[in-house]
Image (spheres, rainbow, N blue to C red):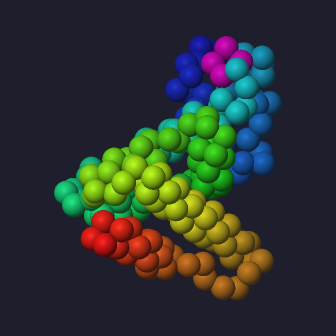
Amino acid sequence: MRYHRGDVVDRAIVVLDEYGLESLTMRRLAAELGVQPSALYHHVPNKQTLLAAVADEILTRGRRSRRARKWDRRVVEVCAELRDAMLAYRDGAEVVVTAYTFGLGAGEPASQLQEALRDGGLPDDLVDVGTRALLHLVFGHTVEEQMALQAASAGAIDRAPGGPADFERGLELVLDGLRSKVNG
């Protein structure tokens, strides 16, 4: 059976979601697809490229239509969509954060945040810092939340992770600071 890159990425997401990032190896993925590991390298040259494609696909699957017109509400939409997309798959946050950090993929949310902050009237230096601050909040909160959810489901911890309300409050705190730079 012949596979396309999209088939490989789709199956990688299934393996990720069922078994976790630690178990997503080229050998396991090849076995899941019923091919030799060397056959995967026709579609992806290495595991880093595979993870970047998985990260981009996670974000693509998590896309929602945008309704907000004001710059700060657009920021909320982008950040919430990013958080929800990462939480939709086991270890999704780790995959997306890693791809973004290493410059391998998952860059679209940063571009969307930059555009919204520019539209809000922030100077370029604050657009860059503001984008990084927002991404740090989303990435950090989501990684911690996902880790806590997994630990709680395994009985390793008995506390509830900070959920959507905690995330939204943190986001509003960052936005208050950004708004003060526009209005101040």
Query: Is 4 situated above or below 24?
Result: above
Magenta-colored segment: predominant secondary structure: loop
User: Quick check: 31 left or right of 50?
Assistant: right
**Residue 60 visible in this rendered orientation of the protein:** yes
Query: Is 91 situated above or below 105?
Result: below
Q: Quadrant of the C terminus?
A: bottom left
Q: Quadrant of the N terminus?
A: top right
**Quadrant of the rendered structure where residue 43 is?**
top right
In this view of the protein, which residue sits in the foreground, 109 or 61? 109
User: Quick check: 123 left or right of 137?
Assistant: left
Name which residue lies at 55% across and 27% down: 7
From the top left corner, tell me how far across and down residue 148 is, in percent: 66, 73
Name which residue lies at 54% across and 66% down: 137
Name which residue lies at 28% across and 58% down: 120
From the top left corner, tell me how far across and down residue 28 is, in percent: 77, 35
- How many numbered marks appear? 0
Name which residue lies at 65% across and 29% down: 49
From the top left corner, tell me how far across and down residue 182 is, in percent: 30, 66
Q: Is residue 71 magenta?
A: no
Query: Is 170 situated above or below 87?
Result: below
Query: Is 149 situated above or below 37?
Result: below
User: Quick check: 32 left or right of 117?
Assistant: right
Which segment did they paint magenta?
Answer: 40-44
**Residue 62 visible in this rendered orientation of the protein:** no
From the top left corner, tell me how far across and down residue 119 is, in percent: 27, 52
